[in-house]
Amino acid sequence: MKNRILAILAVCAAAFLVQGCGETNARYVESGGTRSLISTKKVNIADWNSAASALVDDMLASGVLDRYEKPVVMKVSRIVNRTSEAIDTDLLTKQISITLNKSGNVLTMSEDEYTKDLAQAQAFENGGVPTPKITMSGKIVEDRESIGDTNEVTYVFMLSINSSNGLALWEG
């Protein structure tokens, strides 16, 4: 009898836990929107969205890409991380590459190994792989300040578009 009561209590407790776990307050919010979470201790999606948008807008407005026949082939070079955290810089460079590709002004060269192998095989047959006319490189720098209980973390996103002869054509 005692075991039966314990078994019934265990089943009731399990049912209560399952019901409690089934209810969730999870919901979708727009990445970088007004309802997304803001972190003061790391670079978040709003920072990536804002930096990528501002950099692409400035780059396109500068007219630097107008010097080339469209679409100009671009290679994404190194983005140096000078922050205290491990940052996946692809969050910035991919957003920029996608926007530039969609603009029709730029074609970015793939970093995918299989795609590179295919390009080399095609180059053997056709006499050459397209070479990039411009490269994109950059740096992300962190500045931390604190006064009393107030802490401030600033991230600076620096980007350069360089010509194939090594000259910086645009910086933002």
Image (tube, rainbow, N blue to C red):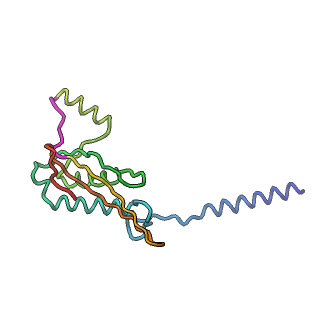
Q: What residue lies at 34% left-to-right and 59% top-to-bottom?
A: 48
The one of 169 and 56 positioned closer to us in this rendering: 169
Residue drawn at x 40%, y 68% is 152
Quadrant containing the C terminus is bottom left
Q: Quadrant of the N terminus?
A: bottom right
Q: Residue at x 29, y 36 (%)?
A: 115
**Quarter of image, res 83:** bottom left
> On screen, 108 above or below 48?
above
Q: Where's residue 108, x and y in %?
A: 23, 46
List the single residue furthest toward the right: 1
- Percent across and percent down for residue 121 are 24, 28
Position of 58 with respect to 153 (left or right) is left
- Residue 95, percent from left and from top: 30, 54
Q: Main secondary structure of the magenta part?
A: loop
Farthest top residue in view: 124
Q: Indicate whether residue 131 is drawn in magenta.
A: yes
Q: Which residues are magenta?
A: 126-134
User: What count of labels does the image hold?
Assistant: 0
In terms of depth relative to the viewer, which is nearer, 111 or 149? 149
Q: Residue lying furthest front in this view?
A: 148
| 118 is within the stretch colored magenta | no
- Residue 108's place in the image compared with 92, above or below, is above
Q: Quadrant of residue 14?
A: bottom right
Height in image: 117 above or below 147?
above
Left or right: residue 53 versus residue 3 is: left
